[in-house]
Amino acid sequence: MKAAVTQLRSAGERLGKYEIEKRHAIESENYDRAKVKKEQAEEYREAVYTTLNIDDLLERKGKLDKNDLPGGSTLQTLPPPLTPQEPPTTTPHSPPLQITVAAAVATVAPPPPHPPSIPSFLPPARYPNTPPKPPPSPPRSPSHLRSALRPHHCLTYVPDP
């Protein structure tokens, strides 16, 4: 179970990267690329669920004795991430872009030997010229509201004779 949790965590990180790439594509109005990233994330998620036998681990079809054995089920390694691809440009007469699982599996590259770095096409976490946000003001008590509800008397200053 611990191995499955560890592998699910790394799969979640990969899915998060697909989501970031999709959002960046949307911000740059490259909707074809965003659609490809969404489809890649869905296909990768399905491949992970199949590889890790999530249905068996969750025991959706009833209690499974093999989950309670000391060795448990043998986990396979996660499928490698799908390689990023730029969608081909389509003309008005060409069919819409479709990616199948077979095509995705055929384009899978082996995982890198070291952790991947953050892609350089992502925007910085905070733009350099953006000043930091000021700290929030302390909460005010409701007593300041009571004075606003009371009638105010206009006083006129009259100097002493």
Image: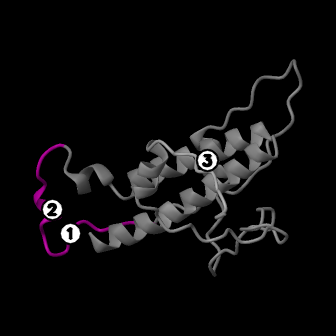
Q: Residue 40 carries which label?
A: 3
Quadrant of the image containing the C terminus: bottom right
Tell me which secondary structure the magenta stretch mostly adopts. loop
* SS under mark 1: loop
Q: How far apart are marks 3 and 2 (CA)?
A: 32 Å
Task: Determine crowd level at label 2: few under 14, some 14-19, many 20+ residues with C-alpha closer than 10 A.
Answer: few
Whether tag 2 and tag 1 are in contact, CB under 8 A, the answer is yes
**Residue at numbered disc 2:** 66
Q: Magenta span has 116? A: no
Quadrant of the image containing the N terminus: bottom left
Q: Nearer the viewer, residue 157 or 22?
A: 157
Mark 2: amino acid: Lys
- Report x, y in % for residue 50: 39, 51
**Residue at numbered disc 1:** 72
Q: Is residue 54 left or right of residue 99?
A: left
Q: Which of marks 3 and 1 is in front?
A: 3
- Toward which corner of the image does residue 108 lie, by quadrant? bottom right
Residue at x 48%, y 68% (from the top left corner): 10
| Farthest residue, direction top | 93
